[in-house]
Every structure is written in structure tokens, then in C-alpha cells.
Image (cartoon, helix red, strand yellow):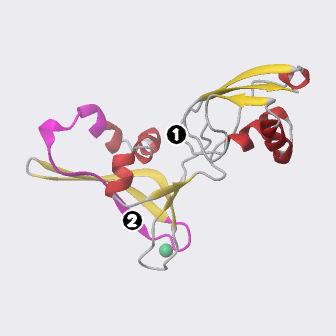
Amino acid sequence: MPTCLPTVLRRCHTCSSERFRANGKFRVNANHKLLDAWLLVLCTVCGDTAKLTVLERTNVRSVRPELLDRMHDNDPGLAAELLQDPVLRRRNRIALDWAGAWRLDTGGSDHLDREVIDVSVRFAARIPVRPVRLIAEGCGLARAEVERLITEGRLVSAVRLSGKLSDGFTFTLKR
Ligand SMILES: [Zn+2]
């Protein structure tokens, strides 16, 4: 689950750093019946502000009033939702870095001494993570040991456990 907003990866035109942080602030401009709206992000090095386009010359009637209210209220939850929107990311040519912005909740440690466990992993946000890393952390194992259990067929899943995942998956572990 996310613990804070992810870092926004984008080149700063002032200092050429590549890391920005959203602080949950928005800017909305109305010109007659047309709206422009941006999510503001700040360069982590020089503090320069960049604007990520949320709405571009959009007729005010086609904008959900709830969305407008949330932007006027600088709703940090809305910033989190928008950053997870792949359309917004493509449009603004940004990527996200989730390092240090999420945590694993295992719901306790009762599972650690069982011989066989079936585990279901849910993502509270689409955060790309290596399943090997999650399994190692959640089961109290070294990553090399997780790799070995996969090779030996004692850690099985319907999904590929190499690479990264951002969708829920299940696995069975036999020690
Ligand atoms: Zn900068």
C-alpha cells in the first residue's frame, strides 16, 4: 500500500534534476466556459514548480462538479489518483518512482512457521514491485532463498514471479 505520493520523474528546466514531488496542490483557470487545470509538482532540488495538465480547454459542463471541488480543495487523494492514471502520465511524459513510497502489510507473522502457505497479494495502488522482493520480505526469507524455492518448484504461482508486477497474484510456498 502507498505511504505517500510517488516521485514524479521529469526533467527540470531550471536545474536539470529529474525528480519532482506533488504536494497535492492544483491550479484551475477558467476562461469563459473553458477550463484548464494542472496538478502542481515541485523539483526536489531547486523547488521550481512544473504543471501537469489535467484538463485542457475543457468545457466546464463536461467536467464533473465533484472533480472541480476536489481540485479547488487541493485534495491530496486526487493527486494520488491522477498520478496513477496512465493517460495523464503519457500526456505529460512523466514516469513514477515508487521507491520509499509504499509498504508491505503482512497482517501479522502467524504464517511464518507453517509448512505450506497459500498467499494472496493485493495491491492498494498499481505499484510495480518485484514479487521475489515481496515474498522475501513477507516470508522472512533472503531473496536468493526465494529464487532457489522457485527453481526447486516449492514456490509456485500462476503468474511469472520474475520481473515486476503491479496486479494482485497468489502463490503457494512449501518449505
Ligand atoms: Zn530543479
Task: State which tag comes first along the sequence, 1 or 2.
Answer: 2
**Could you say where residue 62 lies in the image, as x and y percent from the top left?**
15, 37
Query: What residue is rendered at 82% in x and 33% in y?
Result: 139
**What amino acid is found at the position of numbered circle 1 in the picture?**
Arg
Most extreme residue toward the left, as rendered? 32
Residue closest to the eye, 79 or 146: 146
Res 50 label: 2
The reply to whether dot 1 and dot 2 touch (C-beta < 8 Å) is: no
Query: What residue is rendered at 84% in x and 42% in y?
Result: 148
Query: What residue is rendered at 61% in x and 33% in y?
Result: 159
Q: Mark 1 = which residue?
A: 126
Query: Can residue 61 be found in the magenta stretch?
Result: yes
Dividing the picture into quadrants, the one containing residue 14 is bottom left
Density class for disc 1 (Cα within 10 Å; few <14, some 14-19, many ≥20) is some
Query: What residue is rendered at 67% in x and 29% in y?
Result: 157
Q: Is residue 10 left or right of residue 61?
A: right
For label 2, the SS is strand
Query: Can residue 21 be found in the magenta stretch?
Result: no
Q: Is residue 49 left or right of residue 151?
A: left
Q: What stretch of residues is rendered in magenta? A: 43-68
Q: Is mark 2 within 8 Å of ligand 1?
A: no
Residue closest to the eye, 124 or 44: 124
For label 1, the SS is loop
**What amino acid is found at the position of numbered circle 2 in the picture?**
Ala
